Amino acid sequence: MVDRKISGSEKFEAPLEIQDLDEVKRHVDLHEVDDTDVDPVTFEVLSHRFSQLTEEMGSTVKNVSGSVVATDANDFQTTVGDEKGNLVEIGPYMLFFTGVTDRVAKWVLDHRAENPGINPGDQFLCNDPWIATMHQSDVSLAKPIFWEGELFGWATSIIHQVDVGGYAPGSFTPQASDVFAEGDPIPPVKIVDQHDIRSDVEDAYLRRSRNPPELALDLRAKRAANNLAEERIHEMIEEYGADTVKKVMKRDLEYTEERFRNKLSAYPDGVWSHEHYIEAAKTEDRGVYRSTLEMEIDGDELTFRVSGDESVGMINCTMSGFVGGTTSAILPLMAHDLPWSLTSYVRHINYEADDDIIVNADFPAGVSMGTVSGTFHVHNSAAACINKMLGSSEEYKDDIAAGGCGCWPTENVMGTDRQGRTFATMIMDMMSGGYGATPNNDGVNSAGNPYAPRGMCPSIERNEVNVPMLYLYRREIQDSGGAGEYRGGAGVEICYLPHDVGGPDGDPTDAELDSAKTCMGTAFPPTNGIGGGMPPNSALYKGVRDSGVQEDLRAGDIPQEIEHIGDVELYHPKLQTVQGGDDVFYISWPGGGGYGDPLDRDPDAVLADVVDEYVSKEAARDLYGVVIDGQGVNAAVDEAATEQRRDDLREQRLANASFPGGGDR
Amino acid sequence: MTTVFDEHLVVVDGSDGDRLECRVCGEDVCSTDENYKHHLLQEVTPVEEANPNLVDPGTYVDPDMEFRRYYCPGCATQITTDIMLADREPIADKRLD
């Protein structure tokens, strides 16, 4: 482990605001307006055109990209900002990114205005987590948009890349003790110089990857999306004038800020907190690491304050993750009815984090798992704090949604496909976790993830084309949704083996795939219920080596339970391994948390869950206190036995419990 | 006058200051100045009891973890649940100002 802290690394810590605006203005002329006076109709029309623009940028990303990460799972984001990078609009895609893409622009203005300069047609690539991404795999491209020689605004596109180098395929590096074993963090570099991609910079970027063609195509997808943003903004300016368009951008920020401030004022004042854990900092580690998040509302000010264990292994996130993890919880829970002009939110949020902890790690801590560990960890805690606050508000309690899924068990795969070409990719099925329950409804089964409104689970056929794999099954998991008066949505499991690997002449049973697995939320559920609701399942990696399943398939049998295939191994949540041609792998991920006391659930709802196989008869009896007789369509609630069972369970609760510390009242 | 504290508890005026009581049965729990979890009944069980699909955390980690359920002492309503390191005290996770 390198002694912290590396001299000179301070330059790469991005502040929330531009540090020396006067110096920036010495090198770049900024288009600014003094007021936001604009007629309401023009404001509405242009505001919606900006909103539409980020979606059109997203469509462009999907149309150009060749990566299943972007084309099918929508693990990317598009944003539009003003001349200082303040975010006016964000897309409905991966929300973790939304708290930080403005920082790329602000850092570029502070550090690139003089050398190499910021000119029309330039675009800056960045994947430095200490500046503005969750981890090195999230590579952003920021484009300054000029009008008549003045810097008018910024467009940014960011996609999770399938591999940006480092020790392990997929760049989540389970062995890492620090960033030097991982993909390189690249501070903003001018990769597009006056409209042309610089081949020297692109080569330096692609050279690190196990999948350079896909990275190159994604770079062009982001460039195309940003170019589209420039074209659309120029069209708006030509139609309405630069000052009017800019006034709309500023008014958007003011309007959102005003509405967010009003909402904060309507919430109760107080402090809500949540303690959360991450297991296993790296391969073979058996530790548990903590952070405790406090959320304070005082009038129209919101503060997130976090303390916790020192950064360790590769599970950490930087301040970018802390900001992204909190904003991604705020937007769906507190701002689902407000515009998402994100800078307006950040202006009313104070971020206070202890130095060099797992969710505010100093360089050179390992951060390759920054999204699916540190940032998720913050997101889950922030969502828990917000839900607790909403529970204190009669007016807003219906906005509660218990924790949803809360983790992403990565499966990064590398090998040789059926055509004999090497490939490196990741399985994106995890974009189908269960949603948390609400005060009035069950969580949606295999719905997606709350932090990614447009997140999509790729089809099995798409995956089998993209990766030389064969699914034995993909399905929702019985009893995975957290129990409650309203049940959490069900999580999902997959079971698969390599298929047609090793080239056209290869023996499929001899061929191997490299596999890198990293997950938070294996030893215990990553998320929780609310109001007495129970947690969902955890994520699990399993496998059966030398399974003999190829013979089963040749005989026409498709196994439907991994436990029936052979001796099942449970895999460590930070593991690099090899999947042989006859090795069967299994991955599961969580459902959502429950809402309210399970003993208050309508017995008929439990019956429907049993009939639909979302809940087992055993769980119905043990968790919900509902006794069900019969099977299938003949199943029915035994009402008398249920009433007795629930009375018994309540008595057991009182008999088995005690006051913490052993005292009485 | 009552103020909502959470889904199950309300703040009521008491003779010696604000107190928390159960919405369901009216059971008096504690002063709002205290950690309410210290005044609810706590049942501690293995983590696997939180969901039927969980495995023993000891499969993966060394520190002891536990599942804690908090009940109203009057009516046994499940107020909240936590999964915590066994050596961590219940945190006062809600405070109204």
Image: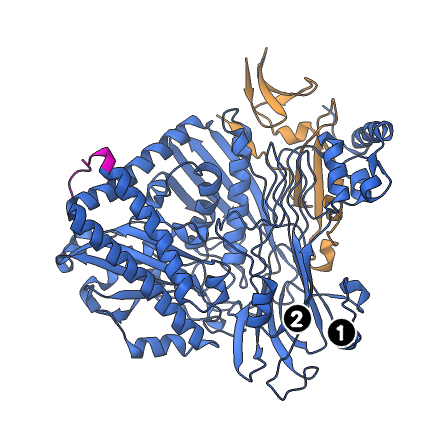
Describe residue A590's horizontal placement relative to residue A291 as left or right: right
- In the image, what residue type sits under mark 2? Leu
Which residue was labeled with disc 1?
Answer: A553
Mark 1 surroundings: few (<14), some (14-19) or many (≥20) residues within 10 A: few
Residue A193 locus on image (x, y percent) = 23, 70
Mark 2 surroundings: few (<14), some (14-19) or many (≥20) residues within 10 A: some
Q: The blue chain is which one?
A: A
Disc number at residue A470? 2
Dot 2 or dot 1: first in sequence order is 2
Query: In the image shown, does A121 or A406 lie closer to the viewer?
Result: A121
Q: What stretch is highlighted in magenta?
A: A32-41
- Write down the chain letter for disc 1: A
Describe residue A580's horizontal placement relative to residue A185 as left or right: right
Question: Does residue A646 appear in this view?
Answer: yes
Is residue A132 rendered magenta in the image?
A: no
- In the rendered structure, the colour chosen for chain B is orange
- Write down the chain letter for disc 2: A
A56 shown above or below A335: below
> Label 1 near label 2: C-beta < 8 Å?
yes
Q: What element carries label 2?
A: strand
Could you confirm whether marks 2 and 1 are on the same chain?
A: yes
Number of numbered discs overlaid on the protein picture: 2
Residue A466 locus on image (x, y percent) = 55, 71
- In the image, what residue type sits under mark 1? Leu
Looking at the image, which residue is at 57% across and 80% down?
Answer: A417
